[in-house]
Image (cartoon, rainbow, N blue to C red):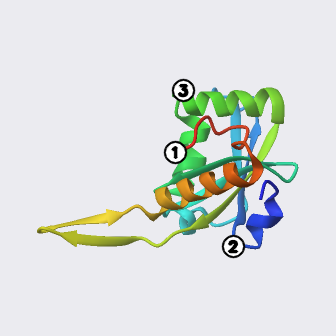
Amino acid sequence: MDKIDYWINLGFVKVARIYASDRLKQGVDVEFFVDKREWADPGVYLLVKDENIEKIGQSANVTNRINTQYKCIANLGNNRIREEIRTNYQSIDVYAIQVPKKNFSMIGYTFPVNYQKGLEESMLHDFYSTVGRLPNLNLQRN
C-alpha cells in the first residue's frame, strides 16, 4: 500500500511530474503526461517518489491542483510541498484517479457531492492502519 504499484492496480495513472526549476518564482514547474483538459475534474492524487507514496490528496479539479496551486499559489501547504520538492526530492510524480461528478438534491437545493474527499479520507485511514504511519508529506489524518 505504500508503493505505487498497489495503487496502479486500482486504477491510478501517472498524470504529471512536479520538478524543481528556476524558471518560475515559486521554484517548481510541472510536466503533464495526459491531456490537462481531461483531468480538470474531481479526483484523488498521490505524490510519488521512487515508487513510495509521499502524499495522498484530493481536489475538485486535479489539473488545477497540480498546475496552478502546487506550481504557483503561495500558502502554507503549497509552500511546504514546493520546499520539499526543491530541497529533498528534485522531482515528484503525480498519479491520480478521477471520481464521479454528481449532484444531489435535498430540501429544494441541488449541490455537488464531493466523492473525492470521502475517498481521500478512507485511503488515508487505510494507509495508516496498514502501514502504521501517514505518507511523509501528509501532516494529519482527516
Secondary structure at badge 1 equals loop
- Looking at the image, tell me whether mark 1 or mark 3 is earlier in sequence order: 3
Q: Which mark, by number, is residue 8?
A: none
Secondary structure at badge 3 equals helix
Q: Which mark, by number, is residue 142?
A: 1
What residue did someone put label 3 on?
76
Residue in the image at 73% along x and 55% along y: 130
Residue in the image at 70% along x and 40% along y: 29
Between 121 and 116, the residue placed more toward the observer is 121
Secondary structure at badge 2 equals loop
Is residue 133 shown above or below 17?
above
Between 107 and 81, the residue placed more toward the observer is 107
**Image coordinates for residue 98, horizontal then vertical, percent:** 56, 68
User: Please, which residue is most extreme toward the left here?
Assistant: 108
How far apart marks 2 and 3 lie (CA) works out to 30 Å
- Looking at the image, tell me whether mark 2 or mark 3 is earlier in sequence order: 2
Look at the numbered discs 1 and 3 and tell me whether their residues touch, using CB distance below 8 Å.
Answer: no
- Looking at the image, tell me whether mark 2 or mark 1 is earlier in sequence order: 2
- Mark nearest the camera among 2 and 1 is 1
- Mark nearest the camera among 1 and 3 is 1
Give neighbour class at mark 1: few <14, some 14-19, many 20+ (Cα, 10 Å).
few
Please state which amino acid type lies under the numbered disc 1.
Asn
Residue 83 appears in the rendering: yes
Q: Which mark, by number, is residue 11?
A: 2
The image shows a total of numbered marks equal to: 3
